[in-house]
Amino acid sequence: MRAYERLLKYVSFDTQSDENSTTCPSTDKQRVLADVLAKEMNEIGIQGVKVDENGYVYGYIEATKGMEELPVIGLIAHMDTAPAMSGANIKPHIIENYDGNDIVLNAQKNIVMETEKFPHLLSYIGKTLIVTDGTTLLGADDKAGISEILTAAEELINDKSVGHGKIVIGFTPDEEIGSGADHFDVKGFGADFAYTVDGGALGELEYENFNAAAAVVNVQGANIHPGEAKNKMKSAILMAIEYNSMLPANEIPAHTEGYEGFYHLCEMHGDEETAKAVYIIRDHNMDNFENRKKYMTKVADYLNDKYGKGTFELTLKDSYYNMKKMIEPHMEIIDRAKEAMLKASVTPVVVPIRGGTDGARLSYEGLPCPNISTGGHNFHGKYEYIPVESMDKMVEIIKNIVSAN
């Protein structure tokens, strides 16, 4: 079975995670896919397959005889899809021999993927693309990673000519809500190092990610009848807007790229009496990251001085840190991935992750774990797509990474 065929099967399962849940996995539907994957892993000959009590899926391929002393290499992907857009009733469309024109995803709703907005489409003229119907995300993040890992595993098991050390496989729930590594059994996994297969365009190789924190601003106002409100009313929602207006207007996702950090307002709601604003804070540089948190605190303190103590309550919580610090002592695993790509005639492109992966957390838990591409684009939305040929190349690259030949 080719990787894209697996992807088409896996995206039929709605595995959207829920950031408001207190369970693991955060949604029962992720466990449904976990059980399906475990069954398939057993069928293709992966050993030691299990789904643990938290919905993590594990298995391994024994080392080729005589190669037991080689490093144990881990391959990891996540099962959930992002809460940002529906992952239910996904209806993928296949476009063969793409002609380079704009792609009408949904004629009825006039949803079009334009080459002017997404010029990388022009790199795939003549290729086969898997796209959405414009009403859901595709789910290639990260079911493409799962598909590529299992296809590579099946081919390695069936092709005895490719020698390799022990290969361990792990599929996690809840990566999209920052919890994918919470219950990952690093010790039981037993890898010397690993790769998450969770990146974007073919050839991307990532070992730097954002330092990340969540911030919640709760605002307490004082509601008075509008007819008698002069010098009395303190509108919580207006004060929340004022707080946001004091953050740098150009340091938001829409105006940043590369190594540039940002403040991102994810949610704001309220009324005159109470209001709430939810942010994420991101920066690759640790000093800048700490300064961003200090600045948000400074703004809250200033506005409390202006409107009265206790008007603004700021809660900050770190989510994960830049894995670069943990990967740099092990750059041989980056070189290994580069060589695997070059062997597959793919040019490696080292880029910073403008986000995070399970690998960032796992690297800090003693498992060096950079990220490699899946071949997809425009994750987390209706314009998500992936070329079939890129998935095939990723299968080849994964085999090259683990191969001792």
Image (cartoon, rainbow, N blue to C red):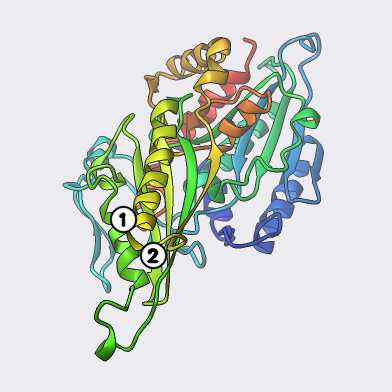
Compared with 243, 96 (above or below) is above
* Residue bearing the label numbered 2: 268
Spot occupied by residue 346 in the image (x, y as percentages of width and height): 39, 21
Q: Quadrant of the N terminus?
A: top right
| Horizontal side, residue 113 vs residue 134: left or right | left
Spot occupied by residue 170 in the image (x, y as percentages of width and height): 69, 37
* Residue bearing the label numbered 1: 244
Q: Is residue 73 visible?
A: yes
Q: The disc labelled 2 sits on which kind of residue? A: Met
Compare residues 31 and 288 and report the one nearer the observer.
Answer: 288
Spot occupied by residue 207 in the image (x, y as percentages of width and height): 48, 24
Separation (CA) of disc 1 from disc 2: 10 Å
Where, by quadrant of the figure, is residue 190 drawn? Answer: top right
| Horizontal side, residue 300 vs residue 367: left or right | left
Q: Is residue 159 visible?
A: no
Residue drawn at 20 percent across, 52 percent down: 114
Count the marks.
Answer: 2
